[in-house]
Image (tube, rainbow, N blue to C red):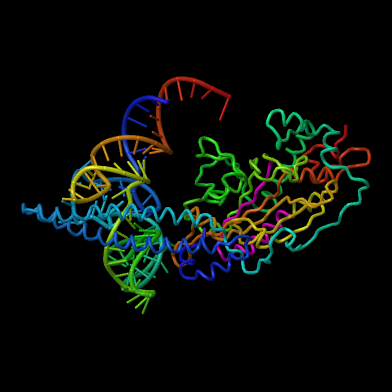
RNA sequence: GGUGAGGUGGCUGAGUGGUCGAAAGCAGCGCUUUGCUAAAGCGCCGUAGUCCAAAAGGCUACCGAGGGUUCGAAUCCCUCCCUCACCGCCA
């Protein structure tokens, strides 16, 4: 959520900073400012009446204490009631309206973020390793089915399209990856492991920015009061919502595994083959909470931590920076990490590392006490470390051998218990 | 799920209709004094909104949340949430 004061004091600057996103928000900002002015006028008037009421009520108390007649004053206070009631309702309605609009306004991209409209405009920041030379690479679906690692048909039978079932060695590979990733980040990168609920309240979804704007992409349950988590970002970042955290703990670093549930509404037919885009997938998420001054360098470190996953597994990847038009709703700056998948002849996004600055913190009222004693909003960041299904795709497609077996990267072998998968 | 108790400022905890944003203690900050690894005294010490060009300052709201009664609500009434204890059920 953007600061209403910024919008009020520098509306033109605010409009220009949002102009590079792929929608025009100037009308929304104008609407917010009109509501804000109306709201404040109503509140000022109301507060004047409240003040008058309070003053008269104290007079009444004094008169009664002295056994004197207070009927005239009581009538005067009563005469204020109708206008006070009307102003209270108006102020509340305007306040709700203002908040509702503020919640659908995206974050400002950082000034240095490259301006662009779509994915093709995202600059490549760095590239690691090289594409392996594999003659006539098979794709992961063919490889996995041949080895019995997944069972797509039965997944559809029990849950519908967009779900997967891992079987036998396939299931064990998934479990090995989870343990490998959590160990890597907690042991080598200093993250604290968190195992959160997979269901969260609506307020949490608003806090991290999934709601109210993207409800159609979420799985709501219990009449809309609870949601299946679309990413561990939601429960983990919200752990400290409505808190004033101790700045001495900064940067707070959490690593969490959860399954991720996404409707993927509107993306039917896109990248739907195999494990690449699903309604449920596993992911290790890295979350950081820090002071504003730290967030820029923490984003670089976070991205580096996620890259280490691919380096350790010997996978070729590249890092791109998202342009203004391609960045997520709450993002101020985002790096995507894309791993090479020979069977797809394409790079697959396996991690998205984002600095949200104070956008989420303001929504969830997450603060710390500054050195001057004032409460300030924290900065929040998160990044996948990494998504599992696409990493799984990369391991199968990069590890495929001419005999149909799959080579398991050395770093993963202690977790998997074997150096290859074969029939 | 049942019964009972309870939710007050960073913490403990008083307060059952009026001058209570709220006693007191602890913690924190500042000053003073004496000195020695601390003590005493004094002062300050919640959050948010709003008014003012800004500062200073004023005003309003907030005692789990939301409604209601009243001239006036931390205090009375209703609904809900949460915590604790015991019982029931259960992986």
Place of residue A221 in the rendered image (x, y in percent of width and height, measured from the top left): 55, 36
In percent of width and height, residue A75 lies at 14, 53
Magenta range is A281-306
| Residue displayed at 72% across by 58% down | A119
Q: Depth check: A89 or A364 in front?
A: A89
Seen at 75% across and 54% down, the residue is A308
Q: Is residue A283 magenta?
A: yes
Residue A4 x, y percent position in the rendering: 46, 63
From the viewer's perspective, tell me whether residue A96 is left or right of residue A149.
left
Q: Quadrant of residue A198?
A: top right
Q: Is residue A292 above or below residue A215?
A: below
Q: Is residue A64 left or right of residue A358?
A: left
Quarter of the figure that contains the C terminus of chain A = top right
Q: Is residue A292 magenta?
A: yes
Q: Residue at x 54, y 48 (%)?
A: A211
- Count of residue discs: 0
Along the line of sight, which residue is nearer the eye, B41 or A3? A3
The one of A66 and A177 positioned closer to us in this rendering: A66
Q: Position of residue B84 (x, y in %)?
A: 41, 35
Residue A245 appears in view = no
Asked if residue A323 lies left or right of residue A147, the reply is: left
Q: Is residue A117 above or below residue A208?
A: below
Image vertical order of residue A220 relative to residue A121, above or below: above
Horizontal arrangement in the rendering, residue A267 relative to residue A204 (left or right): right
Residue A132 shows in this picture: yes
């Amino acid at each position: 959520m953007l600061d209403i004061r910024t919008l009020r004091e520098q509306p033109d600057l605010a409009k220009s900073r949002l102009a590079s996103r792929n929608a025009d928000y100037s009308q929304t900002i104008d609407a917010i400012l009109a509501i804000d002015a109306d709201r404040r006028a109503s509140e000022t008037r109301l507060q004047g009446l409240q003040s008058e009421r309070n003053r008269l009520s104290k007079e009444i108390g004094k008169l009664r204490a002295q056994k004197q007649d207070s009927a005239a004053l009581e009538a005067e206070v009563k005469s204020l009631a109708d206008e006070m009631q009307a102003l209270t309702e108006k102020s509340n309605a305007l306040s709700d309206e203002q908040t509702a609009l503020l919640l659908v306004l995206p974050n400002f991209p950082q000034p240095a973020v490259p301006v662009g409209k779509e994915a093709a405009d995202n600059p490549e920041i760095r590239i690691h390793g090289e594409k392996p030379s594999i003659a006539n690479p098979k794709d992961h679906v063919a490889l996995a089915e041949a080895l019995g690692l997944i069972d797509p048909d039965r997944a559809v039978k029990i849950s519908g399209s967009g779900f997967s079932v891992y079987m036998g060695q396939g299931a064990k590979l998934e479990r090995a990856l989870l343990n490998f990733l959590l160990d890597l980040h907690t042991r080598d990168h200093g993250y604290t492991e968190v195992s959160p609920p997979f269901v969260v309240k609506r307020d949490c979804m608003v806090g991290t920015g999934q709601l109210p704007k993207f409800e159609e992409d979420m799985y709501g349950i219990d009449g809309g009061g609870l949601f299946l988590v679309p990413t561990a970002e939601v429960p983990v970042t919200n752990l400290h919502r409505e808190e004033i955290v101790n700045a001495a703990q900064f940067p707070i670093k959490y690593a969490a595994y959860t399954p991720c549930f996404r409707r993927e509404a509107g993306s039917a037919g896109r990248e739907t083959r195999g494990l690449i885009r699903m309604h449920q997938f596993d992911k290790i998420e890295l979350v950081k909470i820090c002071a504003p001054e730290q967030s820029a360098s923490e984003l670089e470190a976070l991205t580096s931590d996620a890259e280490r996953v691919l380096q350790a597994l010997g996978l070729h990847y590249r890092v791109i920076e998202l342009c203004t038009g391609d960045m997520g709703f709450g993002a101020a700056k985002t790096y995507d990490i894309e791993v090479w998948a020979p069977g797809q002849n394409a790079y697959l996004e396996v991690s998205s590392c984002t600095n949200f600055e104070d956008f989420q913190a303001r929504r969830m009222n997450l603060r710390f006490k500054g050195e001057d004693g004032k409460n300030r909003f924290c900065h929040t960041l998160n990044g996948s470390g990494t998504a599992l299904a696409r990493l799984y795709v990369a391991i199968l497609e990069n590890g495929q051998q001419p005999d149909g077996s799959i080579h398991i990267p050395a770093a993963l072998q202690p977790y998997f218990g074997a150096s290859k998968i074969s029939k």
